[in-house]
Image: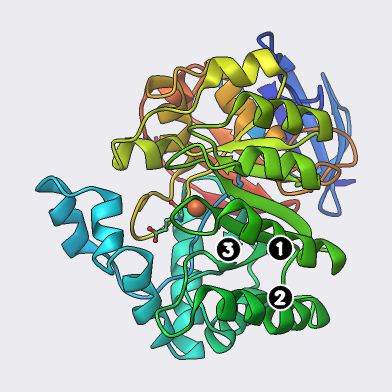
């Protein structure tokens, strides 16, 4: 007796592992069944003849792994509606940043939050993501820029528990420089106080740094990331987003799990990433919203670097929580293929957060995080830009969302 049997779906298995290059394969199987037991996928094949407590008829429906959002800043106080209007009136992200707006604006409102408010905000934001099919999300700290609030943010993530969505925490104290300390003082604080405490309490799996000429230069970023590595944390780099700043090379050199944004990676940076198996996490909504250039997709294809996707959900550069929209923008805006976009939001995203053994594909033994969509053809996922077509979400082998009616 199994717990759930999904019958006759068009199953997008993504069972070929991490994928890169220009010939991707979604591993689609038609009229395929999936048996689920004890939170895991027990079998994926045609005509499974097992008794089941629950049966889902998925005939005429795309069935695919739950979306994995590999890059967000989903815990923050307030909003940036005023800056949104400034941008509409022609100011750039950098102009706003130089005027003390941007990240520092959100730092102020995040520092003012109580623990209870943090819990509420995080839950609200992650519920929204789960509504649009995200079953695992990476969340970065980085709106505290001091010991107290950075640790409070990570503790809120640690308290977060949901039957709908899993959270992977990243420490990102090096998201900006706080007003009250010099650059060196703050970096000393990060390496001498923040990171040791984060490691001692096991509050984050990864450490990320905004490596950019005007923010943390390559040397400063290296110092922070080396310390995190010494403490056995995984590494991520906000790399080459605003200009070619050495972030991709640094990610490659240090063997980071991922480099993210990557609008202007250098040739050497791409080589270094390939050499140590760094995943590129691309954020198409951010470039669109900031009117930036696009990430060089063809270069990633040629270099054989796996591409993953993230929403970059944050109040400034990407107030976007839906992976349907991200997959659509990956195609319409970045020119990725349908296969690349879907791989990017599932199996490659699992690699970008070091979860490839557990999630990202529909295969025997993996966690049963599965979506049944109201689409027949995978191309519809990006085509109907931003539309939420989730009919059923299964998280860890339990139905956690079901849309009734047609
Ligand atoms: O990923 N690039 C740096 N950090 C964020 C922006 C966060 C913000 O503007 O609040 C990003 O786009
Ligand atoms: Fe980001």
Q: Is residue 199 depicted above or below 294 in this figure?
A: below
Q: Is residue 235 depicted above or below 359 in this figure?
A: below
Residue drawn at point x = 75 percent, y = 83 percent:
197
Give the Cα distance between marks 2 and 1.
8 Å
Q: Pointer 3: what residue?
A: 140
Nearer to us: label 2 or label 3: 2
User: Which of marks 3 and 2 precedes in the sequence?
Assistant: 3
The residue lying furthest to the left in this view is 89
Do residues under tags 2 and 3 come within 8 Å of each other at their CB atoms?
no
Q: Which residue is nearer to you in this view: 82 or 176? A: 176
User: Which of marks 1 and 2 precedes in the sequence?
Assistant: 2
**Mark 3 CB within 8 Å of ligand 2:** yes
Q: Secondary structure at mark 3?
A: strand
Which quadrant holds the C terminus? top left
Residue 215, image x, y percentages: 47, 58
Residue 194, image x, y percentages: 68, 80
Residue drawn at point x = 69 percent, y = 65 percent:
224
Q: Is residue 355 depicted above or below 141 in this figure?
A: above
Q: Pointer 1: what residue?
A: 223
Is residue 355 in view from this perspective?
no
In the rendered view, does 110 fall on the left or right side of 187?
left
Q: Pointer 2: what residue?
A: 191
Q: Is residue 146 depicted above or below 96 in this figure?
A: below
Give the Cα distance between marks 1 and 3.
19 Å
User: Which of marks 3 and 1 precedes in the sequence?
Assistant: 3
Q: Quadrant of ligand 1?
A: bottom left
């Amino acid at each position: 007796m199994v717990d759930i049997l999904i019958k006759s779906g068009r199953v997008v298995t993504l069972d070929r592992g991490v994928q890169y290059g220009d010939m991707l394969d979604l591993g689609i199987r038609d009229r395929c069944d999936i048996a689920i037991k004890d939170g895991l996928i027990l079998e994926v094949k045609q005509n499974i003849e097992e008794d089941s407590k629950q049966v889902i008829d998925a005939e005429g429906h795309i069935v695919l792994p739950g979306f994995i959002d590999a890059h967000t800043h989903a815990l923050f106080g307030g909003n940036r509606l005023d800056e949104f209007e400034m941008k509409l009136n022609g100011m750039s992200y950098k102009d706003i940043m130089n005027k003390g707006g941007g990240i520092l604006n959100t730092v102020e409102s995040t520092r003012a939050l109580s623990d209870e408010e943090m819990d509420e905000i995080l839950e609200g934001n992650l519920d929204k993501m789960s509504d649009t099919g995200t079953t695992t999300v990476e969340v970065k700290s980085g709106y505290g820029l001091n010991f107290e609030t950075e640790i409070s943010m990570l503790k809120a993530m640690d308290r977060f528990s949901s039957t709908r969505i899993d959270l992977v925490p990243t420490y990102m104290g090096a998201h900006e420089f706080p007003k009250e300390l010099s650059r060196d003082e703050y970096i000393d604080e990060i390496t001498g106080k923040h990171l040791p405490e984060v490691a001692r309490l096991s509050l984050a799996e990864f450490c990320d740094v905004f490596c950019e000429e005007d923010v943390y230069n390559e040397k400063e970023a290296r110092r922070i990331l080396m310390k995190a590595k010494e403490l056995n944390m995984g590494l991520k780099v906000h790399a080459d987003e605003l200009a070619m700043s050495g972030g991709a090379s640094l990610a490659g050199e240090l063997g980071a799990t991922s480099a993210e944004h990557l609008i202007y990676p250098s040739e050497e940076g791409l080589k270094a990433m390939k050499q140590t198996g760094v995943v590129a996490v691309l954020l198409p909504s951010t470039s669109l919203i900031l009117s930036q250039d696009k990430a060089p997709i063809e270069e990633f294809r040629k270099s054989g670097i796996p591409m993953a996707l993230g929403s970059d959900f944050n109040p400034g550069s990407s107030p976007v929580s839906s992976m349907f929209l991200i997959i659509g923008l990956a195609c319409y805006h970045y020119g990725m293929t349908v296969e690349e976009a879907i791989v990017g939001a599932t199996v490659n995203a699992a690699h970008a957060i070091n979860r490839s053994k557990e999630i990202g594909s529909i295969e025997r033994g993996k966690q049963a995080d599965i979506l049944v969509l109201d689409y027949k053809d995978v191309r519809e996922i990006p085509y109907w830009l931003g539309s939420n077509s989730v009919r059923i979400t299964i998280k860890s082998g339990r139905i956690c969302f079901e849309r009734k009616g047609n």
